[in-house]
Amino acid sequence: MKYIKDKYNLVVIGGGPAGTPVAIEYAKLNPDKNVALVEMAGKLGGECLFQGCIPSKIMQATAKYISSLQELSEFGVVLEDKNYQLIWNKVIQRKEDILSKRTLGAQDVIESLSNIDFIEAEASFINESALELKRVDHKDVVEFDKVVIATGSRSYIPKYKGDGVDKIWTNSDFFAKMELPKSLAIIGTGAIAIEFAMMLASFDVKIYLFARGKSILNNIDKEASQYLLKELKNNKNINILFNADIEIVDFKDEEFVITYMQNREKKQLKSHRVLSAAGRVANISSLSLNSAGVKFNKNGIITSKSLETSNANIYANGDVVDGFAKFAHTAQYGAHTIAQNLFLEHNFFKMKPEINSWVLFTTPNIMMAGITEEDAKTRNLDVIIDRFEFSSEAKSQIENEDYGYLKYIIEKHSNKIIGISAMHKEAHSLGGEASLIISNHLTLKDIIGSIHPHPTISEAYVILAKQMMGKIMQEKLNKPAVKALLNIERWL
């Protein structure tokens, strides 16, 4: 049985992207401090690695190659036999190999730091300065100076009637079983639901997408969501059920029977499996937060911009925080914020949600950094919005990907770029530069002053900046006062 100290300078609860980086960075900065990294699952990686972004992208890589078979003839390659065989066990094994490599890599880093104790246990607060760690065969009480709560979230399953509700899958269930169903009913129209629908449709799974309203992906660029909706409607394996309110989920004869209301009419649908992508719930129920004086609500733990909770010695990061953007990379950003504040012993660093970025790995990809066009309208910001069509860009034409756009949202008075969005098959490759532009508050002039390699889709950054600056300059030059000043300057 692993020896556990009576007291730690820092206890991190959660071994995913919101917790592990805090433990590592703090331990490196403070080699004389003792750190405990507590993870109930006994392995590092969290939801993203085992049940989320990584396994889903592994499957999407396979789906991408299947889709590319249909496009080969456009590049002058004709397959005599267009049939292919999907070896699902090979996909599963590839997923396991990659996940194992990544979690072992994180474990090696932890083991290389002598001042970190990795503990497999469930943590709960006893009071404002002590935790109980429940292990398989033992309970320990440890005191702490500081704690970081990074326990993440889990999928929410609505409380329907019927004997099939307890058999509804979440994303965790899907990746644990790795069963490819004949048909799948997906509850929800957010990012997880749409990614699953497009990915599994590529594997010839019949998809039924339940939407309570008339639209999908309400939190992204409206133009992008409408384009993806058109793609979904054109997919022979996807059927979208709008204005559908599920009431009963039964399970009979090895299949689900879903009873739902649609436009005031009661209907039924049968599906091999059902997956809930109806939202996320913060993992806080077992923490006994009241004992530690940590305030929370139904959406998670309440924190300041420095991620400090109502208990000044306790921080929270990632999905477990109310209002936190549910992305692994945002959690890693939060981890650095906390680690630096702990090192400085002062909350100097703060989260900046306005510089966040993300990618939706659909077909095509959607990338966003900063604010959306809809955000700008809601806030009544004085902005200029323009776009560049990839249909006129060389690399996209070469790769036969001449669709989509790059869009800038700029402050009118400063020409500072405050929002970037893109829709393209390779839009994910544009995300890193977009993040740097937004986080460093770059202007159109800054972008124009850079030299991008040709031919690449990243050239669009400069082309769009020149396009917008040209329009701005033309507008200024058309003003009588500016014309007069320019004539005087030329005469002098």
Image (cartoon, helix red, strand yellow):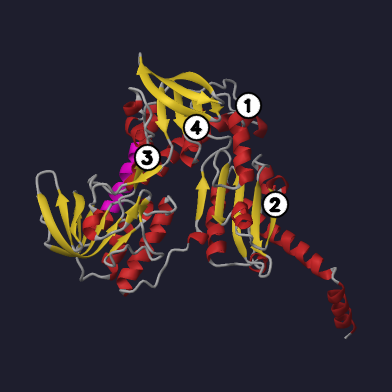
Task: Determine the CA span between mark 3 and mark 4.
Answer: 17 Å
Q: Is residue 465 left or right of residue 291?
A: right
Residue 107 percent location from the top left of the image:
26, 52
* Stretch in magenta: 96-107
Please report the residue visible at 63 percent of the width from the left and 39 percent of the height from the top. Answer: 227
For label 3, the crowd category at 10 Å Cα-Cα, with few meaning under 14, some 14 to 19 and many 20 or more, is some
Badge 2: residue crowd in 10 Å (few <14, some 14–19, many ≥20): many
* Label placed on residue 388: 2
Q: Disc 3 or disc 2, which is closer to the eye?
A: 3
Q: Is residue 234 visible?
A: yes
Quarter of the figure that contains the C terminus: bottom right
Q: Label 3 is placed on what type of residue? A: Ser
Q: Secondary structure at mark 2?
A: strand
Whether label 3 touches label 2, CB < 8 Å: no
Mark 3, mark 4: which one is toward the viewer? Answer: 3
Q: Among all residues in the image, which is located at the extreme bottom?
A: 492
Disc 3 target residue: 155
The nearer-to-camera label among 3 and 1 is 3
- Horizontally, residue 42 falls left or right of residue 208, namely left
Taking the view exactly as shown, the residue that stands out farthest to the top is 253
Q: Which residue is mark 1?
A: 78
Q: Amino acid at mark 2?
A: Phe
**Where is mark 4, residue-wise?**
197
Q: Mark 3 to mark 1: distance in Å?
A: 44 Å
